[in-house]
Image (tube, rainbow, N blue to C red):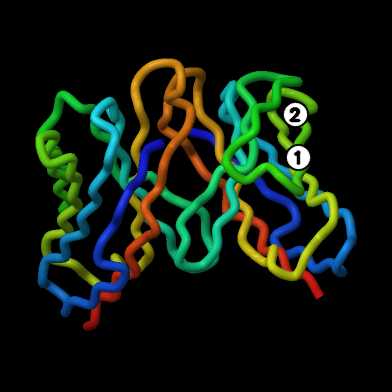
Amino acid sequence: GEQVEQRPPHLSVPEGDSAVIICTYTDSATAYFYWYKQEPGAGLQLLMSVFSNVDRKEEQGLTVLLNKKDKQLSLNLTAAHPGDSAVYFCAVSASGGSNYKLTFGKGTLLTVTP
Amino acid sequence: GGIITQTPKFLIGQEGQKLTLKCQQNFNHDTMYWYRQDSGKGLRLIYYSITENDLQKGDLSEGYDASREKKSSFSLTVTSAQKNEMAVFLCASSTTGNAEQFFGPGTRLTVL
């Protein structure tokens, strides 16, 4: 079945710098891609969703890149600030009847230092 | 917009005890999910339900039961709590055939 590797597990950047998180997936039928943010004691908040026909999506200081050839998905936070400190998860899903099921990466703990 | 409510927020039980976690959503979503989150292991799917009274096993269903009493609610029962089960349990929901899921705040389970 689908496997997702997420790296790095921990990332610390100074305020104003960019932070990049990368996920690699295995199933070429994967069609839906998501990035979630989890703050301490809270559930997962959906940040961005991308369908497989999109290579790049930008929203509110976040950039998602999708490289289908290398089966790689990345999240770039430009000009990170302390409020961005949280755990970030990528999640992917295949197209078709089984697209109820998401496969998650193990998460990246991002710390943005003032 | 909508909201997913999970109760209780913290659940403390004894080893061997049967424990029930509850989830309510007002998105009017058809599909609901239960995940277990262990530190450093991401999220693993326990059960999901695509409509009222439907149940589908996920990757981690052994030791758990679930019940979709009505469209808006989905319960998870730990049939015999074990100490290695201490984790956060997350409920989520989505529209039919859409993998975009919305999550509740979680229930943190501690087993003594």
Expressed as whole percent of the image width and height from the top left, the position of residue A10 reads 30, 73
Residue B75: give its label: 1
Looking at the rendered structure, the secondary structure element under dot 2 is strand
> Relative to A78, does residue B75 appear above or below in the rendering?
above
Residue A96 sits in quarter: top left
Q: CA distance from mark 2 to mark 1?
A: 6 Å
10 Å neighbourhood of mark 2: few (<14), some, or many (≥20)? many
Q: Nearer the viewer, residue B56 or A76?
A: B56
User: What's the mark number on residue B67?
Assistant: none
Q: Position of residue B39 (x, y in %)?
A: 51, 67
Chain on which label 2 sits: B
Horizontal side of residue B90 vs A50, given as left or right: right
Q: Nearer the viewer, residue A54 or B28?
A: A54
Q: Measured from the top left, where is residue A34 in percent x and y?
A: 32, 40
Extreme-bottom residue of the structure: A114
Residue at image coords 89%, 60%: B17
> Sequence order check: which comes first, mark 2 or mark 1?
2
The one nearer the camera, B12 or A3, is A3
Residue on which disc 2 sits: B68
Quarter of the image for the C terminus of chain A: give it: bottom left
| Residue found at x 30% / y 54% | A5
* Mark 1 residue element: strand
In the displayed structure, does residue B65 sit left or right of residue B59? Answer: right
At horizontal 19% and vertical 52% (from top left) the residue drawn is: A75
Dot 2 amino acid type: Arg
Q: Residue furthest front?
A: A1
Picture coordinates of residue A74 (x, y %)? 18, 50
Which quadrant of the view contains residue B54? top right
